[in-house]
Amino acid sequence: MTASRHMNSRHIATASASKQRSYRAHGGGRAHHAASDTGQRLGMRQVDADRCQAPEAYLDQSGSDRGSAAKDAYPTRLSQPPQHLWQTRQEPIVHSHADEGPLGAEQLKRFERDGFIFEPEFLAEEEVEVLKAELAALLDNEEWQGRDFTITEPKSREIRSIFAVHFLSERFRQLAEDPRLIGRARQILGGGVYVHQSRINYKPGFEGKGFNWHSDFETWHAEDGMPEMRAVSASIILTDNHHFNGPLMLIPGSHKVFVHCLGETPEDNHKSSLQSQKVGVPSRKALRELVAERGIEAPTGTAGGLLMFDCNTLHGSNANMSPDPRSNAFFVYNRVDNAMQAPYAASRPRPEFLAHRDDGGWDTLERTDGVSH
């Protein structure tokens, strides 16, 4: 059993305090959060989503914007199909140059073009072995079984995802704050960052189910209130990823458009969507057109590789049909000035283990374990 297998309150408090210091040191600070959702604000957004909306998706037949009292830049979860399948992205993709961080000019160019880059052997073998041991301890930790932040496979008790992993494990907290990752995120996003979400995705051999095609930003925008596309995901391969154990698949260039999705967000949608996402997924017509134009790529490699991808890049994965488990650690870095607002297409925000604050805290875990600050 590793030392962090059963983190006590003191360990969690220390990790949280260290996180706060680290974010400020990296330009995080405390952003001014918008007020929590109100019925009036959400009502206006829902009216917009079906009436006047965004420039390219909701022009009338004459080509004129019908106007709106409170426009949503990226309307989604709509009740009726829009005139266009998608709209053009509004934010820049890369905000810095090669001399402003660890990524070279060619890497930044590929990220701009494709919406992702893959760096094999990003971590040394000895680093990977330590993380593998920590992963095994987390999966075997009965303290986390049955908790909200631990997601199991549909119709089984096999763990599918563990969220807020940088709070649950000191080693994964250190990885989330590793200057090599922070530096890449800051270079791409062009400002101070914090961890919006962390998780481990685990696909057991033979049993691991797939993830439907989706844009993370669509979910974070609709259900968490992320205003703009100013976030990037860093995925560390913890076990060898090959073509038969369900590697992550991405549609190159899909980050340059926002695909509007149909269907109202159900109450507590995260309780089912984290097992099998059905709301907030692109239409098959949109996917056919994007894949026909841009194709599909599935970066594979040995444990220790790093995949960084834009928050709006469409991605998904197949079921694991092999005997080999597949696991990845994800850290989502959001720019500090892109702080969460009221959800754009949900009645209330998702729990904090899915959308952390930029101050480095997590009240749910602290209340559960009796930690006070």
Image (tube, helix red, strand yellow):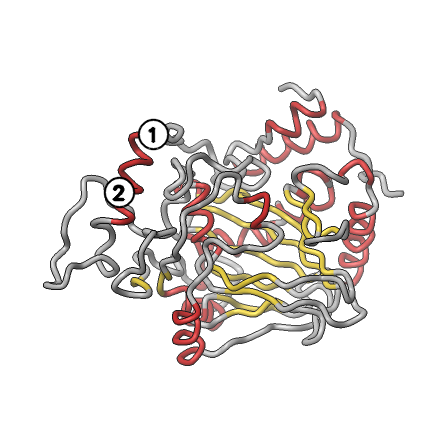
Query: First in sequence: mark 2 or mark 1?
Result: 1
Q: Nearer the viewer, residue 112 or 210?
A: 210
Alpha carbon separation for disc pair 2 and 1: 12 Å
Residue position marked by numbered label 2 in the rendering: 47
Question: Based on the displayed image, in which of its 4 quarters is residue 39 positioned?
Answer: top left
For residue 188, side relative to residue 22 (left or right): left
**Secondary element at tag 2:** helix
- Number of marks present in the image shown: 2
At 20% from the left and 50% from the top, the residue drawn is 52
Taking 366 as reference, is 151 above or below it? Answer: below
Residue position marked by numbered label 1 in the rendering: 39
Residue type at mark 1? Answer: Gly
How many C-alpha atoms fall within 10 Å of the one at disc 1: few (<14), some, or many (≥20)?
few
For residue 32, side relative to residue 131 (left or right): left
Question: Based on the displayed image, in which of its 4 quarters is residue 258 positioned?
Answer: bottom left
Q: Quadrant of the C terminus?
A: top right
Residue type at mark 2? Answer: Val
On the image, the x and y values in percent for residue 360 come to 57, 33
Q: Nearer the viewer, residue 372 or 180?
A: 372
Q: Nearer the viewer, residue 177 or 271?
A: 271
On the image, the x and y values in percent for residue 141 come to 82, 41
**Secondary element at tag 1:** helix
At 56% from the left and 35% from the top, the residue drawn is 352
At 39% from the left and 36% from the top, the residue drawn is 341
On the image, the x and y values in percent for residue 311 come to 47, 56
Taking 194 as reference, is 30 above or below it? Answer: above
